[in-house]
Image (cartoon, coloured by chain):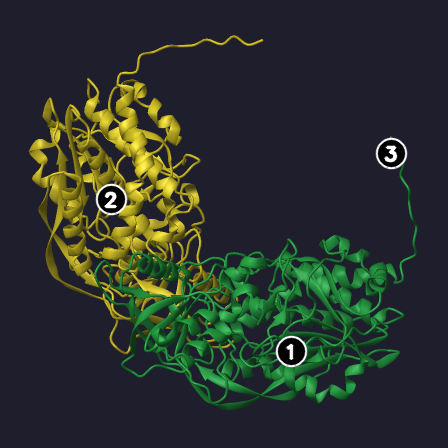
Chain colours: A green, B yellow
Amino acid sequence: MMLAVLFLVAAPYPQALAERVVGTALRDGVAYSRLQDLTDSVGPRLSGSAGAEAAVAWALRKFQEDGVPAHTEPATVPHWVRGEERAELLPAKGVAALKLAVTAFGGSPGTPSEGIEGDVVEVHTLDEVQALGAGAKGKIVFFNHAMSTASGKTGYGAFVDLRTHGPAEAAKAGAAAAFVRSLATASFRSPHTGTTDFAEGAPRVPAAALSTEDADLFHRLLVRGAQVRVRLWLGCKTLPDVQSANVVAEVRGREKPEEVVLLGAHLDSWDLAQGAIDDGAGAVIVMEAARLAAQLRPPPRRTIRVVLFMNEENGLAGGKAYAKAHEAEAPHHVAALESDSGAGGPLGIVLRAGGDGKALLAPWLAPLKTVGAARFVDGEAGGADLSPLGPLQVPFVSVRQDTAHYFDIHHSAADTFDKVDRDDISRTAAAVSWVAVSLAEMEGTLVRPPPTPPRRRGPPDQPQPAASPPPSAVQQRR
Amino acid sequence: MMLAVLFLVAAPYPQALAERVVGTALRDGVAYSRLQDLTDSVGPRLSGSAGAEAAVAWALRKFQEDGVPAHTEPATVPHWVRGEERAELLPAKGVAALKLAVTAFGGSPGTPSEGIEGDVVEVHTLDEVQALGAGAKGKIVFFNHAMSTASGKTGYGAFVDLRTHGPAEAAKAGAAAAFVRSLATASFRSPHTGTTDFAEGAPRVPAAALSTEDADLFHRLLVRGAQVRVRLWLGCKTLPDVQSANVVAEVRGREKPEEVVLLGAHLDSWDLAQGAIDDGAGAVIVMEAARLAAQLRPPPRRTIRVVLFMNEENGLAGGKAYAKAHEAEAPHHVAALESDSGAGGPLGIVLRAGGDGKALLAPWLAPLKTVGAARFVDGEAGGADLSPLGPLQVPFVSVRQDTAHYFDIHHSAADTFDKVDRDDISRTAAAVSWVAVSLAEMEGTLVRPPPTPPRRRGPPDQPQPAASPPPSAVQQRR
């Protein structure tokens, strides 16, 4: 026989409030239908493109439809365009000619119109490039790696530096070009783009992702001692910067309007596809929180502010511009949540706050039982667009999502609406909305954490909520 | 208590023979290493291409290395070349511009250099095209379907007619071009090519596969009443026919050399990738049977003949040429086995023979227990290249394989060596080799079946061994 003990604890919120937020998000499925509208009617929206500007107009229109006051705030963004791109493995002894599956990295310069031809040399770390010495001269440096999972030691965070910094290292070593094996957990010859960084004035080389299949082929051939010689044509280039914008929307607080619960996601996407999971999903999820909060009578105690950032993918201009413009207001940001982990279902809540933040938030989590997220989980709270707020000690809260298949399609041409499950995204929208309302409604606020430590190297690669099971290593993403 | 009854039946073969065939295939893994050589050093080998001719030379060389006498037999093949290909969804009200993921079908004409532009109209059957009447005029007819499994009612066989005959129907109706949703069980924006047929002198239109994602997008937009307008550029064309060849190799029988056990696979592949599973795998599997049979002392009672057919993918010239050249010899073909279902592991044996073929073969199956195939399973024996032998009443035997993931990459740019598992292909090579030796060694021969019925429509779409579970409908493949 077992002894059943019933604890009756009064919830710190009216049950009807939870139903109006969580229940409505699940019933309406607005995040899902709105994501279809964004992906199909706005489409790709790389910073500086017409699509990005259309996305800004779209977001303003949608906030208006939802009765949420919104405006734009300026952000000056890079304008990189892709152009044609192709590469060929050249025939050699024991090597068949093959059209390769490649895609340029954002920020890459193009090749001359006749292309670049070179022998491929394989490396696995940034240090190995330096070890090549003169052996890198005129070569195409190929960064291979063992990414096979979303997180952990074989995850995105373990290898993303090869993409962000590898081509710059190859350029410094005198290479002619650089390939990086796609940062992908699955592939049908589908290369994954992403940004690569060259320091101002430092040498640059054309740099492209190579499909995992072609990376495997290169490796097989090189192990056999064959010559791997490639011709690469990239038509990409960087045009003058463009004046663009974050979209900022607010549901003003009834008692403490100056205290802000910030919800962020990014409106820009890569250009290869519809940007459904990265980060159309995040955008519609935080928009749903605003829509639901705007329907509450009375409105929550504090202000819920939704920022759709521009240029997360290749510059972070929007995130930086927001932090700069709102620096004086930072002490009044009582919490910030970024939604940039795709459209998977919610797994739980991650906190980065001082004191015992969990004790404060825990009594509010019961309504998340129905969506499977009524618990705290390990991981890193925050996100790339929020990273400039870390030094300002803003507490971060994340709804960790299932990202098991996120890196199958992330940054690839396969990031399309069909990959999104209505139930999953609705549950995450419900969880984010309820967490936002909780943070805006609860009596106290989270204790501010110590400032975030300085970045390891290069531009801000931000921690991300990782897939189940919890990662042993800090996850980096961009 | 259970009663254990032990049947001791003398096997009709020496145990050492089974070990020399099955054991060696599993230990050596030659099918796997040879497939790597074919895919990496010969690569794509579409009929008429330099790659196809290189494959013929490669096969002759490998048979020579194996001590298996081989020669070529002529086959005149089409020479279709792909060229550049791209398509764009044009912006309209509620429709974002998007670069589409398309690939031309073999046999398609190209577009004018400025492309073809038209509104998309969706159909689901060949009959629906005729029902469009004048509504098809100048349109781009889009064949959508519900393929989601390898076999059965949502399988390849259920929808392949849309690809082989849909574009011709669209052309007859006055359409400007045709798209067919990829015949695929998975996709990362990876369109699947394949052949499409236009009757001699009948109207032709440019015809391309559309990735499943883009097909879903078209469907979503059309359901909403949006205009789906596309511009399509295809650089493909058909050049004059080319003299090519089947490669025919033989291990001559010790007692009845005139009796032939025929093993077939096709050496040609599509041009988008390495042709690893379609049908490099089949080629190296039947080559392994010849290699192992050639090592037997004494050799099997009957002749084992391996034919690597040319042009299975887009014309079947090799299969037809073989049947014609060897028609007089057909009554001495005691069995024929085609290996064209990828590199998956073996599931069991399928027979198409008269009388009680199973009773004859069953005592020989015990050595296949170790590879999981010591049983008869339902399905269709035969294959496209063997189909011209059906009317000549040649008994067909198949080793049915696991094809659950075959149509994920079949005919796409993702058909690359990395998709092949060494253990799976070794087990299938062992099974095919042992079945071949059994058929060549057993005392009697299979009873000849009735001739195959006439084909339903168009060129030979042949039955294939289907994935587990056994299909309810006859599977068609090409």
Query: Residue A73: x percent and y percent?
Result: 66, 88
Label annotation for residue B25: none
Q: Secondary structure at mark 1?
A: strand
Q: Is residue B169 above or below residue A5?
A: below
Residue A2's disc is 3
Chain name for mark 2: B
Residues at circles 1 and 2 in contact by the CB criterion of under 8 Å: no
- Identify residue for label 1: A308
The spot of residue A461 in percent (x, y) is 59, 73
Q: CA distance from mark 3 to mark 1?
A: 51 Å
Counting labels gives 3
SS at circle 3: loop
Which of discs 3 and 1 lies nearer the camera? The answer is 3
Relative image position of residue B17 (x, y in whole percent): 26, 24
In primary-sequence order, the first of circles 3 and 1 is 3
Above or below residue B64? Residue A366 is below
3D distance between C-alphas at marks 1 and 2:
54 Å
Mark 2 vs 3: CB contact within 8 A: no
Position of A282 with respect to A226 (left or right) is right
Q: Of B236 and A207, which appears nearest the observer?
A: A207
* Left or right of residue A408: residue B208: left
Q: Quadrant of residue B296?
A: top left
